[in-house]
Amino acid sequence: MGSNTIQILVAMVIYMAAVIGIGVVYAKKANKSSENYYLGGRSLGPWVTAMSAEASDMSGWLLMGLPGVAYWCGLADAAWTAIGLAVGTYFNWLIVSKRLRRYSIRANNSITLPEFFSNRFREKSKVIMTISALFILVFFAVYAASCFVTCGKLFATLFGLDYKLMMILGAVFVLAYTILGGFLAESASDFMQAIVMVIALAVIVIISIVKAGGINAVIENAQAIPGFLEFFGLASPTLNEAGEQLVEAGKPVFGAAAEYGWLSVASCMAWGLGYFGMPQVLLRFMAIRKESELKSSRRIAMVWVVISLAVAVFIGIIGRHLFPIEHLTKSGAESIFITLSTSFLPPIIAGFVMAGILAATISSSDSYLLIAASAFAKNIFQGVIKKKATDKQVMWVTRITLLAIALIGIVIALDENSVIFSIVSFAWAGFGATFGPLMVLSLFWKRTTRAGAVAGMVGGAGMVFLWYFLIKPLGGVFGIYELLPAFIFSAICIVVVSLLTKKPSKEIEEDFEAVKAGKVEG
């Protein structure tokens, strides 16, 4: 291991030590009760709420997946996805945050998403709680896998070590950290990691522009590639039989620009719909200490999101100019951020920037593991299987569940050719379609019924799988991102079934009106 590699490793170890320190500091408070462990006792301030929500949401795909898309096929896919995410972020904070924070208190002080849906409809049989908890387990196992893939690629690229070994070690670290500190540690570290992520992005884009000879040089190179710098066109890398991009005279080979119509734009913009069903973001709305602070949090979150997404896309464009033939596969393209960092920064600084990728990964995977574990331990074990379970028993089941989910994620992540962006997009669609329409309608439509809620969740999740595996491969108009048709189908299911079933009870309607009027303490 060379001197430069050692310096990078030292910097990353220092960063990891800081993360573990946060876990130790919050461990005692987190383990006082399940409410503290899962929701931090509703004590988050506006800055931590905003930054931890966005850091846990963006994950490693912000630093690897999104730049990789821009590097591989140009501006359109990456830019429209980024725009959709920014718009979705804004409306989620604007429309959902206050009402959910208020309603979660009215709904018997709910501290998990399945518990909120169950209490919202005052169900006794816990059908909604069980179904929603099971879907959270399924989709977060996939999400966790994307984070483990990021860990594996990062260390394999940096140190030339075995991908599978590095992926497993990364998963073990995340698991240990999540078990230690719970929601408070997760949120506090996410706040720090959000800062590291945006600084890392800014540093790399500024230095890369200088190395490229200025923005004009980057733009000229991008314009020379058919469809690469267009909002309504897509670059088409020419591939050989092995799936690698062809190279001629030291330059990558591209075919004619592919068409990029409004259907493709709608497909990418649909990413924004996913926010309405993202547990890791919605929980932050529930955990903030005061409803009045959500406005400040929204502004902080939007500034972070817009800057981070824009810079991430531009890094991919710059990378194609500086290292045109460094990454010849779609999966390999996701390492362009690593290539730029290690090429242009002093090793010790590069190590801290690499920690930015690890920060993004940890900030997401600990959220995914914790929420998925709480879905089983709090909502299925205590809510259905053993209703008189003590807090201590719930905590033990949580830790066992964390281990099981991590193992499933590791199995999914074993393929080193996995594309982070693709894994994330499927899980994102799953959450967005399963919970998004239900969240919006349960908060704002009094007529929503328990049967409608069940139909919406099952219909939305089912349509994601049906569209992705059976309909999408047909291509053409059916090639649209599965989140859009599944979200629409879920909303239709909720509305139709709610109208066909008996209207909610007087108590449920009273809850709704009290929340609407702001007559909720807490």
Image (cartoon, helix red, strand yellow):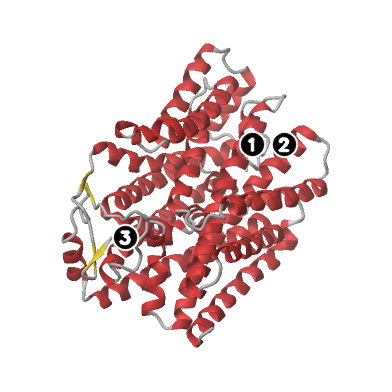
The alpha-carbon separation of the residues under discs 1 and 3 comes to: 36 Å
Please, what secondary structure does the residue beneath circle 3 have? helix
Residue at image point 39% right, 34% down:
472
Mark 1 to mark 2 CA distance (whole Å): 9 Å
Q: Earlier in the sequence, mark 1 or mark 2?
A: 1
Identity of the amino acid at label 3? Tyr
Vertical side of 514 occupied by 255: above or below: below
Tag 3 residue: 71
Q: Which mark is residue 380?
A: 2
Residue labelled with disc 1? 134
Separation of residues labelled 3 and 2 (CA atoms) = 43 Å
- Viewport quadrant of the N terminus: bottom right
Are the residues at dot 1 and dot 2 in contact (C-beta closer than 8 Å)?
A: yes
Neighbourhood count class around disc 2 (C-alpha, 10 Å): few under 14, some 14–19, many 20 upward: many
- 510 and 409: which one is in front? 409
Q: Are marks 1 and 3 in contact (CB under 8 Å)?
A: no
